[in-house]
Image: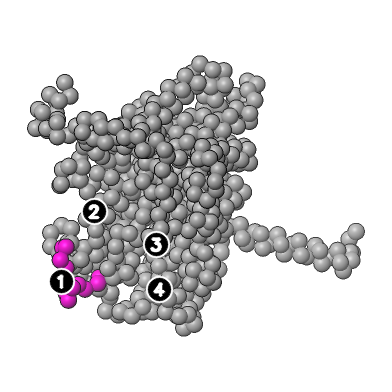
Amino acid sequence: MQLADVSSSFTERGVLRRSAVIVVFLGIVLFVLPAVLGADWIKTLTAVAIYAVVAAGLVTLYGRVGMISLGQIALLAVGTWTATRIAFAFDLPFPLLLLVTGAITCGVGVIIGLPALRLSGLYLALITLMAAGAVNVVLTTINFPNGGGGFTGRTSTPDLSGLEPVGRPGIAEGDTAYYRYTIVVCAIMFLLIALHFASKPGRAWAAIRESEPAALAAGVNIVRYKLWAFALASFTTGVAGGLLAAQLGNPTAFGFPTQDSLTLLAAALIGGIYSLWGAVIAGLFSQLAPFLFQAQWGIDPNFLLIIFGVGLLQVLLTAPRGIVVQMPQDIRNLGRLGARLYHKVSGPRGET
Amino acid sequence: MVSFALSVFGVDWVFLKPYIVLGLALGGVYALSGVGVVVLYQATGVLNLAFGAIGAAGALIAYYLVNHTSWPHWVAYLACIVFGAAVNVVYGVLLGPAFAGRDPLVKMMGTLGLALILLGVMAWRAPAGGAFVRVLQLPTTNHRYEVFGAMVTLTQLLALAFALLLTIGTTAFLRFTKLGTAMRALASDREITATLGVPVRRVELVAWLGSGIVCGGAGLLLADLFTSLDYTALTFLVISSLAAALIGRLRSLWITLAGGLAVGLLQAVVTPYASITAYRTAAPFVLAIIALLYLGRHRTVTLSRTAG
């Protein structure tokens, strides 16, 4: 896939325009949407933001470094579990809880990533899938903490009167306030990733993606930067897990099936694996689309699976950069076609 | 010998015997699907994530024919296998060439697309849910044998035998026939093979056809061994059965067979131990990770073609 021009997208021309677009986008998301949408929409959009951050981890790993992880949802589950456990054990301020959760998940990601770096391509993807499967088995067994003692924090006889959900930050108790809080935190995560793309690690990752031997020859410390990518993606995913823990209140192990890691990657590929906007689209696809199909339009959500499958094949075969690049191009082509048709109808003007 | 080795570790051989038998029966499932994955990977270079979905869809068709038509049952079973072959061949003809020059990862994701489509169609046409459970029972399941105090059905033995036969047959086919040699050449370099005058598309078609038959057959056996025809579970059974394939490094059919049996054995043998029994389903993943890390311990920088 030819991507030489993508890696510089954050540094070169159009920074001002780009920032303006982002500010307008955030403004709409933060202030307009909560004003016009109902409560279930806001809940869904909170999940969209959280899963968009997870997809941004995939954009980092695959889009930038060329490593596929098939275990991001398992990592999200680790983050959610960690946040829940810490929330039950200590009384940390919420931002600190997110940071600690991110750091611990980052550690887990690096522990999985370090030995996996010896493998490449298909095998790396599959070992992350195997790790995700193992994590899933462990999580379904120990389940999520419900206020018990010990490491697992789970008791079979929870004191129902004392069973508190994971606390939300004091300034964001309600669903709409928590939605805004989530958007802000997720925007910070996107900014963190974007800053990485625009600076030294981003360039090192691009070099590794294009050719590992060439990057090695150019003096890029491959192990260090690959691990860095793993660490960054795991950290942001961990923070997303913390946000999810407070969003759900009492998370369960059933919310994180292993196959979701596969479908999220499919969504990220469809959205556009080489762009952070693609991650936003992936979040919309994986969380908003089922909601729209089922609750809003009353269509069997299983059609979504078919659309996903067809979309994935289409993206892989004809549009490797996904919707985020393809859609504007298609619209432009359509516009050009319309203009040509218009000229044909209105007769040639000037030229033959 | 084995009993001595086990008794050294304080394990009671007699106590474990039925679990070992069950483990081998279960291992047959992993071995069967693992070998099926490796066969296709060897022949076409495609790691087929739709392996489970194709088999599940075929089994669903067989279920429908058995329960809603008066046709003889063998027609239904045949339909499952024919369906597997047909889907694979259609995919191979339509999309095989388009994916041919691409990275193995991209090829794998392509089959994920197929799996999602099949899963969506299955869930749409045959909604699951509630207390309604589909059961597709092969007539061979009614034949039970007692081996070392464990009950084994003929279907379980059949799965094991099928995995074994598939391994032997494919190994022999790939090594000794002209077509098999062409397939191996194709798997390692499509362009050069084409230059040598091998009818690349035709050989690929045979590979897809063969693996499709395996998909269908395995789907039929797995649907039975799984006790209920849960197509979502069957579709993503591919994740745990990949473990056996990974132990064989997607290369060796024999190690895949052994890996599948080892996974089944480990899973069954830890069952009676209360402290770890809940983690037994992690056995495939743990073994696969250990195998991958062990096999990847020599770090090599490989000059691969640009992923595309």
Q: Which residue is mark 2?
A: A141
Which circle, 4 or 3, is nearer the viewer?
3
Q: Which mark is residue B130?
A: 3
Residue placed farthest to the bottom in the image? Answer: A35
Instruction: Tell me the kind of residue under disc 2.
Output: Thr
Q: Chain of mark 3?
A: B
Answer yes or no: is residue A299 visible. yes
Q: Which residue is mark 1?
A: A159
Which circle, 3 or 2, is nearer the viewer?
3
Distance from the alpha carbon under mark 2 to that under mark 4:
28 Å
Q: Chain of mark 4?
A: A
Distance from the alpha carbon under mark 2 to that under mark 1:
20 Å
Of labels 2 and 1, earlier in sequence is 2
Q: Are marks 4 and 3 on the same chain?
A: no
Distance from the alpha carbon under mark 3 to that under mark 2:
24 Å
Tell me if residue B171 comes above or below residue B94 in the rendering.
above
Of labels 2 and 4, earlier in sequence is 4
Find out whether residue A149 is within the magenta segment. Answer: no
Q: Position of residue B289 (x, y in %)?
A: 31, 39
Find out whether residue A163 is within the magenta segment. Answer: yes
Residue placed farthest to the front in the image? Answer: B70
Q: Which residue is mark 4?
A: A43
